[in-house]
Amino acid sequence: MKENKAAGKSFSFSSCRAVISSPAHTVLRHHLLLSIKLKLSWSRCYCQTPALLQSINHKPPHGHGINAQDSQTELYISSSSRWTELNKRYQLSAKHAPQTRQKNRSFGLKAPSFVLLLTLRISVSLRMSASLWVWRLLAVWTLLAVSSSQRNGLNAVDFSQRFGNALPSLSRPANASQIFYGVMFDAGSTGTRIHVYTFIQKEPDGLPVLDNEMFHSMKPGLSAYADIPEIAGHTVRQLLRVAKKTVPPVEWKRTPLVFRATAGLRLLSPAKAHALLEEVQDVFDESPFYVPPDSVSIMNGTNEGILAWVTVNFLTGRLNRDTQKTVGILDLGGGSTQITFLPKSKKTIESAPADYIVRFDMFNSTHKLYTHSYLGNGIKAARLSALGALGSDGLEKKVFKTSCLPKKHTGEFSFGGFSYHVSGVTNGVTGFKACYQEMLKVVKGIINQPHELKDSSTFYAFSYYFDHAVEAGLIDESRGGAVKIRDFRKRAKEVCNRPSKRSQLNPFLCMDLTYIVCLLKDGFGFKESTVLQLTKKVRNVETSWALGAAIYHFQKFRIH
Ligand SMILES: O=c1ccn([C@@H]2O[C@H](COP(=O)(O)OP(=O)(O)O)[C@@H](O)[C@H]2O)c(=O)[nH]1
């Protein structure tokens, strides 16, 4: 809770005065720079990247986007009685307001400085004395700034202090006494997503309840904009609209925004990743939400694995009970893959590489987990590895061949902002066996085999494990389900050896299913009889590291 105290520093009148007393030219310069930057970004965006427009209008893949459940949420949140109720509830004093970064422009500053800028423009166009107008309007602006800063201060409360312990409950109580929100951005290698979580605090010192999640995603991932970072900012700005729609304006100033990037940015050069993060930080700083310190960063793989484990065990109600009953998780992204579980056998702990065993404290207990993130073993990165296309240049002229594609197939696929030409092997062997040998190169000697996975254990698998099981017809998209690794193998064999309509729709299905089987069996060392619980959502909340990260961020449990 130490960090929480720091984050919840009081909002003082002196910070308000500092804003007001900033010289007029600083405000002006700020606005001019901003408008120039915006114009530049927009023109570059239109001229250079028609793909952006596509990505904005992109229809999210199955199960994504604002679905029926999301629209219900909007209705629920925007009912006017609810808003009045919310307003009444927050009768808290200004001293609880979260500290806002100096760079972060508050609503109190925005409107008056806009008036000032507008007036200056009018005065120039009317050929009036600009300095006279500046001084007149500065007075008006100062008055407005004082009143709006004070107004904002009155409604603010310290979010982090009130998060306390979170319980895995998703009920929507009729007499909810406090509602608060948290916004988590997941910048993955294949897409960027926003999760807006609504929590209810029934009693001041009681345990909050996760009430709802609003989710939206945009493709491609930000790493595709490594050379045009302005567009990363635009993507985040688009997604922020979901937060603005979901969180009532009265709550914006105390609702934290957190952004975490995964494999896509980890695989970029530090300079390119930094430029993208800077764009995101700028968008956050412009936003009316609370921007805590360290709100924009690349998350490390260990945390990614642990936080997905926290999400699943939290949502399935296992975190606050006997920790021996937790379930393991398997996450398969585009760039990386994660495995996390609570080891039962000593041998697993003793034989694992030292950095695969991680301890962390949460809800007054210490957990010792086996966790690892394999960068380059996500399903799209694995395609590149198997094709021998990783790090290759002169891509326009090259065609990468594989026995995993139908013999006569020629096509291309994109990942991380690059396009790769691919084809089947016209004169060679194709099919499951040959394909398996290609995929084996991507996992053999790379993936550690935890000792106890040879016994039966319960694992939840999501992300591309889920998506491909749906595509292969192994599970129903809306219900998910239990699938044996043997079932994945059988279906991979069918798809690879007997090309059908399904493989015509997605020529990579053979390769991707074969990789999944290879990763699970020859990578992690699971038995064919192991049952995986394939899940997209638990109680209507996305199964990903994002909820765990929200809890981690606000709860501040320790990973060591
Ligand atoms: O809230 C989320 C976040 C991700 N995904 C899935 O996760 C996979 C992609 O992972 P990502 O692009 O984040 O890859 P990474 O960067 O982790 O390698 C895709 O199947 C997504 O549909 C999901 O289902 N829900």
Image: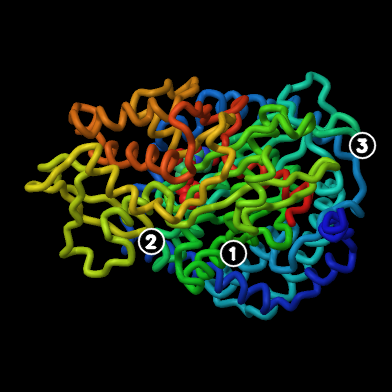
Residue 235, given in percent of the width and then of the height, sits at: 48, 53
Residue 381, given in percent of the width and then of the height, sits at: 38, 54
18 lies above or below 291: below
Q: Earlier in the sequence, mark 2 or mark 1?
A: 2
The residue pinned by badge 2 equals 45
Disc 3 secondary structure class: loop
Residue 123, given in percent of the width and then of the height, sits at: 59, 72
Distance CA(mark 2)–CA(mark 1): 17 Å
Q: Which of marks 2 and 3 is in front?
A: 3
The reply, left or right, for residue 100 in relation to residue 436 is: right
The residue positioned 71% from the left and 76% from the top of the image is: 24
Distance CA(mark 2)–CA(mark 3): 48 Å
Distance CA(mark 1)–CA(mark 3): 35 Å
The reply, left or right, for residue 302 in relation to residue 151 is: left
> Quadrant of residue 519 in the image?
top left
Q: Can residue 244 be seen in this view?
A: no
Q: Is mark 3 within 8 Å of ligand 1?
A: no
Q: Residue 205 — which label?
A: 3
The residue positioned 55% from the left and 77% from the top of the image is: 127
Q: Which of 77 and 384 is in front in this view?
A: 384
**Marks 3 and 2: in contact by CB < 8 Å?**
no
User: On the rendered image, what quadrant is the C terminus found in?
Assistant: bottom right
Q: Mark 3 packing: few (<14 Cα in 10 Å), some, or many (20+)?
A: few
Amino acid, disc 2: Cys
Amino acid, disc 1: Asp
The reply, left or right, for residue 510 in relation to residue 366 is: left
Q: Which residue lies furthest to the left in this view?
A: 427
The residue positioned 57% from the left and 48% from the top of the image is: 240
Disc 1 secondary structure class: helix
